[in-house]
Image (cartoon, coloured by chain):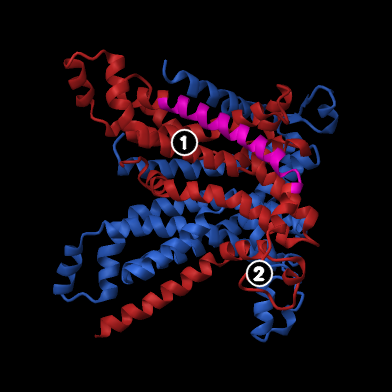
Chain colours: A red, B blue
Amino acid sequence: MRTRTRQRTFGALAVVIALIWMFPVYWMLNSSFLPYNRIRAAEPTFLPLNGTLSAYGRVFDSNFFDTLRISAMVTGITVVAALLFAFLAALALSRFRFRGRRSFILAVLIIQMIPAEGLFISQFKLLEGWQLLNSVVGLSLLYIAAVVPFTIWMLRGFVNGVPRELEEAALVDGCSRLQAFFRITFPLLAPGLVASGVYAFLQAWNEFTLSLVIMTRPENMTLPLWLRSFTEANRVSDWAGIMAGSVLVAVPVMIFFLLVQHRMTSGLVSGAVKG
Amino acid sequence: MLLLPALAILVAALGYPLYRQAVMSFQEYGLAQQFGQPPEWVGLDNYVTLVTDSYLWTVIVRSVLFCFANAAITMVIGVALAVLMTLVGRGPRLMLQIGLLLAWAMPHLASLTVWQWLFDSQYGVINWLLLNLGFEQFAGHSWLIDQLSFFVVATVIVVWMSVPFVAFAVYAGLTQVPGELYEAAQIDGASAWARFRTVTVPLVRPVLLIVMLLQIIWDLKVFTQIFVLQDAGGITAQTNLIGTYIYRLGLGEGEFGLAAAASWFVLLLTVVLSLYYVRVLIREEEL
């Protein structure tokens, strides 16, 4: 009986903490539906009954779609290139033994931890020298380098998970090496590629520091930069619009995140995805 | 051969800047050089300037304090929530996990924007709540203007963002502990606390260590949160951490040589910590 009540108390505590933790997310949605007079009332409105979508209209009237395009291009390039490069490297690391293999893996692990904050000054100078400041290609280049190490590490775990014997069996059955790869190994790796792709997508889509440094012109802003300047411009007058902007920036990627969250945690903690 | 593309891009976008950074940190590289004057070789001058500048040390001490305070608070709350998840029934656990996941999934910029709104001095819901709890002084209170309260806000936000990862990672570790061990300990007469200390903690130690290292590495380089909050009304000189300091020094004032030298501090510190992290990782798993 005593354990029963104790479990109940803990349960209630867990629910309260859960509500506190998700409150900011709820508040973002709630505020985005409120008209001017209700968002600036002495008493906050907790339920957006009879709300309005006009705040979203104000977002669409800004340069939201232009920045969306820039973000989409940078992210697209980053995901495709990072996946391709990392996939090749992961194959090499897990299927072949060669000199320097171990040190390459170590280097990947360490490089993955290098923070943009320690390097952005010289990365800025580098792109400046190559005339790539304010360019989609320049920013993508930095992003690819930033996500490739972890993507290699993640994919390596997946490639390791596909038994070599499967490929060998296919070879015995008369497949060519290439056929064996595309018909047996590749389909088994698909979940890994999806997970790593989403990881790269999230990194590039949400990144702030490097895009702040590289994309200095307002017409080249990525979405996080746009949200920052939109907030600056409307801080005094229009929090509903700002919240609507946040919703548009946040909600689509949150869905993606929830899809791969599990693999990312285990990837960071155990060093390899064993899924 | 398959490694070449990955290698090439790493060398181009990380390796070469690293080299440039080393060279630049030994050069007089200010605004004049930005406009075409060849940089002058000044040896260790930049480092001497930095090391003798008391402001740099203020920033470093501040960053380290901020990092440890945040990492410690995040770890304590994260582990507590992970333990809580093991104690409650399915419904509350799911609810807690959803709450944490939502916070974790938010892009940093969106979170920061929402938190600015929550802490807004005039219409923010936090001031409203405090006011209604009887704290009159919070009517129209501005959170960011005062140095200490600026860092309280920053800590709340960073902890809110980072706890989910810790909680999930530790919870995953906790569920790996076989139940028989607890039963055995219980039969031997161990109390709940003794069971936690002698059975659970040793078994999840590797996970705790890794998660803590990652937290420290991440909190040391915190940039976005501070930068955005400074925008929102913090006083820059009082609230700079190492990341924003380098940014203002380099891109703000054009002192690229100095900024490059200061960057080494961040780099070396994270690489040393990372080496340790990698060592722990590798002990966990054969390559």
> Of the residues under marks 1 and 2, which one precedes in the sequence?
2
- Say which of B48 and B22 sits in front: B22
Q: Is residue B94 left or right of residue B11?
A: left
Q: Secondary structure at mark 1?
A: helix
**Chain for numbered disc 2:** A
Q: Position of residue B270 (x, y in %)?
A: 53, 43
Q: What residue is disc 1 on?
A: A197
Figure quadrant of residue A161: top left
Q: What residue is disc 2 on?
A: A50
Q: Secondary structure at mark 2?
A: loop
| Residue drawn at 42 percent across, 36 percent down | A194
Figure quadrant of residue B283: top left
Figure quadrant of residue B181: bottom left
Q: Residues within 10 Å of mark 2 (few under 14, many from 20)?
A: few
- The reply to whether residue B25 is in sight is no
- Say which of A45 and B226 sits in front: A45
Where are the magenta residues, as a range?
A: A61-87
Q: Position of residue B287 (x, y in %)?
A: 31, 34
Q: Is residue B4 above or below residue B113?
A: above
